[in-house]
Image: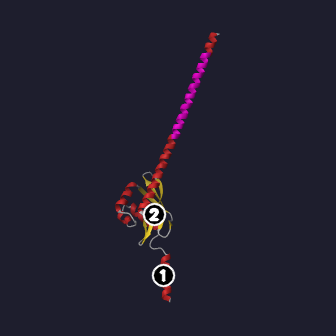
Amino acid sequence: MRFLYAAGLIVLLGACGERGETPKAVSVRFWDTFQEENFEAARAWTVDGNASDLRALSEAYSLEQFAFDDAFRNESRALVPTRAVLAPAGRDLDFYTHLRRDESGWRVELRGTRRDLTRQALAGSFEGVQESLRKSSDALVEEFEQRALQASETLREALEGLERALTSEDEKGT
């Protein structure tokens, strides 16, 4: 009976406990090896990646200074909020590292992570473009207002001159 009780307790503890590392710890290890450009080691932390995919990701995005928050997760999937500095722009980039749990533990889903990273990088680029357009349009509006003011001043002066000319003609005629 003790044997069955002990076996049941072991099964219960095994089912409730963590197998291997947490999603956050796996994310940290993955991005550390990625930053070191050790793509074979980084590949070992993925479910669906290969070294050439990782190399291409590294060439597309120069990421540094990673920070991680606690994961949102269920039994088999997790999202780890990740922040990295996108060099050389020096702009913070917030995205999710996607993970999936398999028989070996938590592993990064490169496809989902890359998709989220790209989406956030593009959104940041569009924000930069929008800011530039806003500044340009503000400058254009200011330029237009200045020219309109100058044109109205010139028109006012011309009308005053015309009025003086007409008044002097009227005075000559009388």
Residue under label 1: 10
Q: Main secondary structure of the magenta part?
A: helix
Whole-percent x and y of residue 1?
A: 50, 89
Whole-percent x and y of residue 22?
A: 47, 69
Q: Nearer the viewer, residue 98 or 164?
A: 98
Q: Is residue 112 left or right of residue 152?
A: left
Give the residue type at disc 2.
Answer: His
Q: Name the residue: 48% across, 48% down.
A: 128
Residue 122 is tagged as none
Snapshot colouring: secondary structure
> In which image quadrant can residue 142 be found?
top right
Disc 1 on helix, strand or loop? helix
Residue under label 2: 98
Q: Name the residue: 36% across, 57% down.
A: 56
Give the residue type at disc 1.
Answer: Ile
Number of disc labels = 2
> In which image quadrant can residue 20 be found?
bottom left
Q: Residues within 10 Å of mark 1 (few under 14, many from 20)?
A: few
Magenta stretch encompasses residue 144: yes
Compare marks 1 and 2 and give the one earlier in the sequence: 1
